[in-house]
Amino acid sequence: MNQQDLPRYRPLLSDARAHLTHEVSALDERGRASTISIPAERPLTVYVDKRELVTLMTLGGAPEALTLGYLRNQRLVRSIEDVVSVQVDWSVDAVAVVTRSGIADVEERTAKKVVTTGCGQGSVFGGLMDEVETISLDDSARLTQSVVYRIVDTIRTQQSIYKQAGSVHGCALFSNTGELLYFVEDVGRHNAVDAIAGLMWLEGMRGEDKVFYTTGRLTSEMVIKGAQMGIPFLLSRSGTTQMGHMVAEKVGMSLLARCTGKHFLLLAGQERLVFEPELLELPPVPRSA
Protein backbone atom coordinates (compact mmCIF):
# COMPACT_ATOMS: atom_id res chain seq x y z
CA MET A 1 0.00 0.00 0.00
CA ASN A 2 1.48 3.33 -1.01
CA GLN A 3 1.07 6.63 0.80
CA GLN A 4 -1.80 7.76 -1.44
CA ASP A 5 -3.82 4.64 -0.57
CA LEU A 6 -3.71 5.40 3.15
CA PRO A 7 -6.91 6.95 4.54
CA ARG A 8 -6.64 10.62 5.46
CA TYR A 9 -6.40 11.45 9.13
CA ARG A 10 -9.58 12.93 10.56
CA PRO A 11 -10.07 14.00 14.17
CA LEU A 12 -13.05 12.61 16.07
CA LEU A 13 -15.93 14.91 15.15
CA SER A 14 -19.41 15.28 16.56
CA ASP A 15 -22.30 15.71 14.14
CA ALA A 16 -24.19 18.45 15.95
CA ARG A 17 -27.52 19.43 14.44
CA ALA A 18 -29.27 22.75 14.93
CA HIS A 19 -32.33 24.45 13.47
CA LEU A 20 -31.12 27.06 10.99
CA THR A 21 -34.30 29.18 10.99
CA HIS A 22 -36.82 30.34 13.57
CA GLU A 23 -40.45 31.35 13.00
CA VAL A 24 -41.78 34.64 14.35
CA SER A 25 -44.97 36.66 13.95
CA ALA A 26 -44.87 39.93 12.04
CA LEU A 27 -47.22 42.71 11.00
CA ASP A 28 -46.85 44.36 7.61
CA GLU A 29 -47.46 48.02 6.73
CA ARG A 30 -51.22 47.35 6.57
CA GLY A 31 -51.31 45.66 9.97
CA ARG A 32 -51.72 42.20 8.45
CA ALA A 33 -50.30 39.36 10.51
CA SER A 34 -48.08 36.64 9.10
CA THR A 35 -45.50 34.11 10.21
CA ILE A 36 -42.04 34.51 8.76
CA SER A 37 -38.73 32.67 9.06
CA ILE A 38 -35.63 34.43 10.38
CA PRO A 39 -32.12 32.98 10.66
CA ALA A 40 -31.21 31.30 13.91
CA GLU A 41 -28.28 32.79 15.80
CA ARG A 42 -26.57 31.18 18.75
CA PRO A 43 -23.31 31.49 20.68
CA LEU A 44 -20.66 28.81 20.34
CA THR A 45 -17.94 29.05 22.97
CA VAL A 46 -14.73 27.37 21.88
CA TYR A 47 -12.72 25.53 24.52
CA VAL A 48 -9.28 24.24 23.55
CA ASP A 49 -7.84 21.71 26.02
CA LYS A 50 -10.37 22.98 28.61
CA ARG A 51 -9.27 26.61 28.16
CA GLU A 52 -11.94 29.06 26.99
CA LEU A 53 -10.73 30.70 23.80
CA VAL A 54 -13.51 32.68 22.09
CA THR A 55 -17.27 32.83 21.62
CA LEU A 56 -18.48 32.82 18.02
CA MET A 57 -22.00 33.94 17.09
CA THR A 58 -23.13 31.50 14.44
CA LEU A 59 -26.03 30.08 12.48
CA GLY A 60 -24.82 26.65 13.54
CA GLY A 61 -24.91 24.92 10.18
CA ALA A 62 -21.35 23.55 10.26
CA PRO A 63 -20.02 24.07 13.80
CA GLU A 64 -17.24 21.47 13.68
CA ALA A 65 -15.86 22.82 10.40
CA LEU A 66 -16.23 26.39 11.69
CA THR A 67 -14.18 25.56 14.77
CA LEU A 68 -11.43 23.87 12.78
CA GLY A 69 -11.31 26.67 10.22
CA TYR A 70 -11.15 29.29 12.95
CA LEU A 71 -8.19 27.56 14.60
CA ARG A 72 -6.52 27.15 11.21
CA ASN A 73 -7.04 30.71 9.99
CA GLN A 74 -5.90 32.17 13.31
CA ARG A 75 -2.76 30.01 12.99
CA LEU A 76 -3.37 28.62 16.47
CA VAL A 77 -3.16 25.01 15.24
CA ARG A 78 -0.81 24.33 12.32
CA SER A 79 -1.79 20.81 11.29
CA ILE A 80 -5.04 18.84 11.26
CA GLU A 81 -3.06 15.94 12.75
CA ASP A 82 -2.58 18.04 15.90
CA VAL A 83 -6.32 17.96 16.59
CA VAL A 84 -7.59 14.88 18.44
CA SER A 85 -11.29 15.72 18.61
CA VAL A 86 -13.90 18.45 18.07
CA GLN A 87 -17.11 17.89 20.02
CA VAL A 88 -20.06 20.33 19.83
CA ASP A 89 -22.77 20.30 22.51
CA TRP A 90 -25.65 22.66 21.74
CA SER A 91 -27.22 22.04 25.16
CA VAL A 92 -24.45 24.21 26.60
CA ASP A 93 -23.61 26.17 23.39
CA ALA A 94 -20.00 25.03 23.49
CA VAL A 95 -17.41 23.07 21.54
CA ALA A 96 -14.56 21.19 23.17
CA VAL A 97 -11.36 20.80 21.17
CA VAL A 98 -8.65 18.40 22.32
CA THR A 99 -5.17 18.76 20.83
CA ARG A 100 -2.18 16.44 21.07
CA SER A 101 0.22 18.86 22.69
CA GLY A 102 -1.69 22.09 23.35
CA ILE A 103 -1.18 25.52 21.77
CA ALA A 104 2.28 26.90 22.44
CA ASP A 105 2.32 30.36 24.06
CA VAL A 106 -1.48 30.48 23.87
CA GLU A 107 -1.82 33.39 26.33
CA GLU A 108 0.63 35.56 24.39
CA ARG A 109 -0.76 34.62 20.99
CA THR A 110 -4.37 35.36 21.93
CA ALA A 111 -3.75 38.49 24.02
CA LYS A 112 -3.73 40.96 21.12
CA LYS A 113 -6.97 41.27 19.19
CA VAL A 114 -7.90 43.41 16.22
CA VAL A 115 -11.55 44.42 15.80
CA THR A 116 -12.48 44.07 12.13
CA THR A 117 -15.29 45.31 9.95
CA GLY A 118 -16.86 41.86 9.89
CA CYS A 119 -20.35 41.02 11.05
CA GLY A 120 -21.13 38.10 13.32
CA GLN A 121 -17.70 37.36 14.73
CA GLY A 122 -15.46 40.27 13.87
CA SER A 123 -12.24 40.06 15.84
CA VAL A 124 -9.02 38.27 15.00
CA PHE A 125 -5.91 37.58 16.96
CA GLY A 126 -3.10 39.94 16.07
CA GLY A 127 -0.19 38.95 13.89
CA LEU A 128 -2.00 37.80 10.77
CA MET A 129 -0.73 40.79 8.81
CA ASP A 130 2.80 39.71 9.70
CA GLU A 131 2.22 36.48 7.76
CA VAL A 132 1.13 38.28 4.58
CA GLU A 133 4.80 38.73 3.63
CA THR A 134 5.30 34.94 3.62
CA ILE A 135 2.31 34.13 1.35
CA SER A 136 2.92 33.51 -2.34
CA LEU A 137 0.00 32.53 -4.56
CA ASP A 138 0.31 30.53 -7.78
CA ASP A 139 1.30 32.87 -10.64
CA SER A 140 0.27 30.36 -13.30
CA ALA A 141 -3.38 30.08 -12.18
CA ARG A 142 -5.89 31.26 -14.77
CA LEU A 143 -9.65 31.85 -14.73
CA THR A 144 -11.79 32.38 -17.81
CA GLN A 145 -14.53 34.95 -18.08
CA SER A 146 -17.05 32.22 -18.89
CA VAL A 147 -16.26 30.45 -15.61
CA VAL A 148 -16.80 33.72 -13.72
CA TYR A 149 -20.27 33.88 -15.27
CA ARG A 150 -20.93 30.21 -14.46
CA ILE A 151 -20.02 30.85 -10.80
CA VAL A 152 -22.25 33.93 -10.57
CA ASP A 153 -25.16 32.04 -12.13
CA THR A 154 -24.67 29.06 -9.81
CA ILE A 155 -24.83 31.32 -6.77
CA ARG A 156 -27.92 33.04 -8.17
CA THR A 157 -29.81 29.75 -8.40
CA GLN A 158 -28.41 28.14 -5.23
CA GLN A 159 -31.00 27.17 -2.62
CA SER A 160 -30.16 29.10 0.52
CA ILE A 161 -31.22 30.28 3.95
CA TYR A 162 -30.84 33.82 2.58
CA LYS A 163 -33.65 33.28 0.07
CA GLN A 164 -35.84 31.80 2.80
CA ALA A 165 -35.06 34.11 5.70
CA GLY A 166 -32.48 36.74 4.66
CA SER A 167 -29.94 38.28 7.05
CA VAL A 168 -27.07 35.84 6.42
CA HIS A 169 -23.90 35.77 4.37
CA GLY A 170 -22.87 32.94 2.06
CA CYS A 171 -19.45 31.72 0.97
CA ALA A 172 -18.68 29.12 -1.65
CA LEU A 173 -15.68 27.22 -2.95
CA PHE A 174 -15.49 26.40 -6.65
CA SER A 175 -13.05 24.58 -8.88
CA ASN A 176 -11.38 26.67 -11.58
CA THR A 177 -13.85 25.13 -14.07
CA GLY A 178 -16.82 26.44 -12.08
CA GLU A 179 -17.86 23.29 -10.20
CA LEU A 180 -19.43 24.09 -6.81
CA LEU A 181 -17.55 22.21 -4.08
CA TYR A 182 -18.84 23.77 -0.84
CA PHE A 183 -21.51 26.32 0.04
CA VAL A 184 -21.82 27.58 3.63
CA GLU A 185 -24.02 30.29 5.12
CA ASP A 186 -23.67 32.00 8.49
CA VAL A 187 -24.60 35.20 10.28
CA GLY A 188 -21.12 36.54 9.51
CA ARG A 189 -19.08 36.04 6.36
CA HIS A 190 -15.98 35.40 8.48
CA ASN A 191 -17.67 32.35 10.03
CA ALA A 192 -18.64 31.09 6.59
CA VAL A 193 -15.09 31.40 5.22
CA ASP A 194 -13.69 29.70 8.35
CA ALA A 195 -16.11 26.80 7.91
CA ILE A 196 -14.96 26.28 4.33
CA ALA A 197 -11.35 26.46 5.49
CA GLY A 198 -12.16 23.71 7.99
CA LEU A 199 -13.78 21.53 5.32
CA MET A 200 -10.74 21.97 3.07
CA TRP A 201 -8.46 21.07 5.98
CA LEU A 202 -10.38 17.90 6.72
CA GLU A 203 -10.15 16.79 3.09
CA GLY A 204 -6.54 17.85 2.57
CA MET A 205 -7.72 20.07 -0.27
CA ARG A 206 -5.27 22.54 -1.81
CA GLY A 207 -6.33 25.98 -2.98
CA GLU A 208 -4.24 26.86 -6.02
CA ASP A 209 -6.86 25.59 -8.49
CA LYS A 210 -9.86 26.93 -6.56
CA VAL A 211 -12.05 30.04 -6.66
CA PHE A 212 -13.63 31.56 -3.54
CA TYR A 213 -16.93 33.44 -3.67
CA THR A 214 -18.50 35.53 -0.92
CA THR A 215 -21.68 37.57 -0.77
CA GLY A 216 -19.95 40.01 1.61
CA ARG A 217 -17.50 42.81 0.98
CA LEU A 218 -13.83 42.02 0.38
CA THR A 219 -12.11 43.29 3.51
CA SER A 220 -8.47 42.75 4.45
CA GLU A 221 -9.36 39.82 6.69
CA MET A 222 -11.31 38.06 3.94
CA VAL A 223 -8.38 38.49 1.54
CA ILE A 224 -5.88 37.25 4.13
CA LYS A 225 -7.97 34.17 4.90
CA GLY A 226 -8.33 33.35 1.21
CA ALA A 227 -4.60 33.76 0.73
CA GLN A 228 -3.88 31.55 3.73
CA MET A 229 -5.87 28.81 2.01
CA GLY A 230 -3.75 29.30 -1.12
CA ILE A 231 -6.70 30.46 -3.24
CA PRO A 232 -5.70 32.90 -6.02
CA PHE A 233 -9.22 34.10 -6.95
CA LEU A 234 -11.68 35.92 -4.70
CA LEU A 235 -15.08 36.98 -6.06
CA SER A 236 -17.89 38.98 -4.47
CA ARG A 237 -21.20 40.50 -5.44
CA SER A 238 -20.21 43.36 -3.11
CA GLY A 239 -17.25 45.74 -3.17
CA THR A 240 -13.86 45.91 -1.48
CA THR A 241 -12.11 48.14 1.01
CA GLN A 242 -8.86 50.03 0.56
CA MET A 243 -7.00 47.63 2.84
CA GLY A 244 -8.57 44.59 1.19
CA HIS A 245 -7.34 45.87 -2.15
CA MET A 246 -3.87 46.62 -0.76
CA VAL A 247 -3.49 43.12 0.71
CA ALA A 248 -4.71 41.50 -2.53
CA GLU A 249 -2.04 43.35 -4.50
CA LYS A 250 0.61 42.41 -1.94
CA VAL A 251 -0.14 38.67 -2.04
CA GLY A 252 -0.91 38.62 -5.76
CA MET A 253 -4.58 37.67 -5.47
CA SER A 254 -7.07 38.28 -8.28
CA LEU A 255 -9.93 40.32 -6.83
CA LEU A 256 -13.27 40.53 -8.64
CA ALA A 257 -15.95 42.75 -7.10
CA ARG A 258 -19.53 43.73 -8.00
CA CYS A 259 -20.10 40.40 -9.74
CA THR A 260 -23.72 40.48 -10.90
CA GLY A 261 -25.07 39.20 -14.19
CA LYS A 262 -22.29 39.77 -16.73
CA HIS A 263 -20.80 42.73 -14.89
CA PHE A 264 -17.71 42.61 -12.67
CA LEU A 265 -14.81 44.84 -11.67
CA LEU A 266 -11.37 43.22 -11.75
CA LEU A 267 -9.41 45.19 -9.18
CA ALA A 268 -6.20 43.19 -8.72
CA GLY A 269 -4.37 40.28 -10.32
CA GLN A 270 -5.50 41.26 -13.83
CA GLU A 271 -2.97 38.95 -15.50
CA ARG A 272 -4.80 35.83 -14.31
CA LEU A 273 -8.17 36.50 -15.92
CA VAL A 274 -8.71 35.26 -19.49
CA PHE A 275 -11.14 37.69 -21.13
CA GLU A 276 -13.63 36.32 -23.67
CA PRO A 277 -15.10 39.40 -25.37
CA GLU A 278 -17.33 37.30 -27.59
CA LEU A 279 -19.46 36.54 -24.51
CA LEU A 280 -20.59 40.16 -24.48
CA GLU A 281 -21.35 40.53 -28.16
CA LEU A 282 -24.98 41.42 -28.77
CA PRO A 283 -26.95 39.26 -31.23
CA PRO A 284 -27.74 41.03 -34.50
CA VAL A 285 -31.01 42.94 -34.56
CA PRO A 286 -33.32 41.39 -37.21
CA ARG A 287 -34.25 43.73 -40.01
CA SER A 288 -37.90 44.50 -40.36
CA ALA A 289 -39.53 43.15 -43.51
Image (cartoon, rainbow, N blue to C red):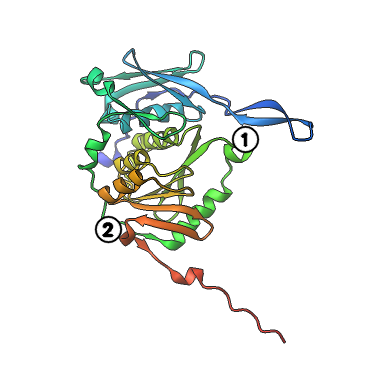
Name the element at disc 2: loop
Label 1 crowd (10 A; few <14 / some 14-19 / many >=20): some
- Does residue 255 sit above or below 273 in this rendering? above
Q: Which label's residue is closer to the chain start, 2 or 1?
A: 2
Quadrant of the rendering where the N terminus is positioned: top left
Q: Position of residue 163 (x, y in %)?
A: 61, 41
Q: Position of residue 205 (x, y in %)?
A: 34, 42
- Does residue 55 sit above or below 129 in this rendering? above
- Does residue 30 sit above or below 100 in this rendering? below
Is residue 101 something that shows in the picture? Answer: no
Left or right for 187, reference 49: right
Q: Where is residue 33 in the image (x, y as percent from the top left)?
A: 77, 29
Which of the 4 image quadrants contains residue 200? top left
User: What amino acid is labelled 1 in the image?
Assistant: Ala
User: What amino acid is labelled 2 in the image?
Assistant: Ser
Q: Residue at x 37, y 55 (%)?
A: 267
Q: Which residue lies furthest to the bottom in this view?
A: 289
Along the viewing direction, whichever of 82 and 231 lies nearer the viewer: 231
Name the element at disc 1: helix
Quadrant of the rendering where the C terminus is positioned: bottom right
Q: Which residue is drawn at 27% across and 20% down?
A: 111
Q: Residue at x 53, y 49 (%)?
A: 155
Label 2 crowd (10 A; few <14 / some 14-19 / many >=20): few
Residue identifier under label 1: 165
- Does residue 213 sit above or below 263 in this rendering? above
Along the viewing direction, whichever of 273 and 270 lies nearer the viewer: 270
Residue identifier under label 2: 140
Q: Which residue is drawn at 31% across and 15% down?
A: 49
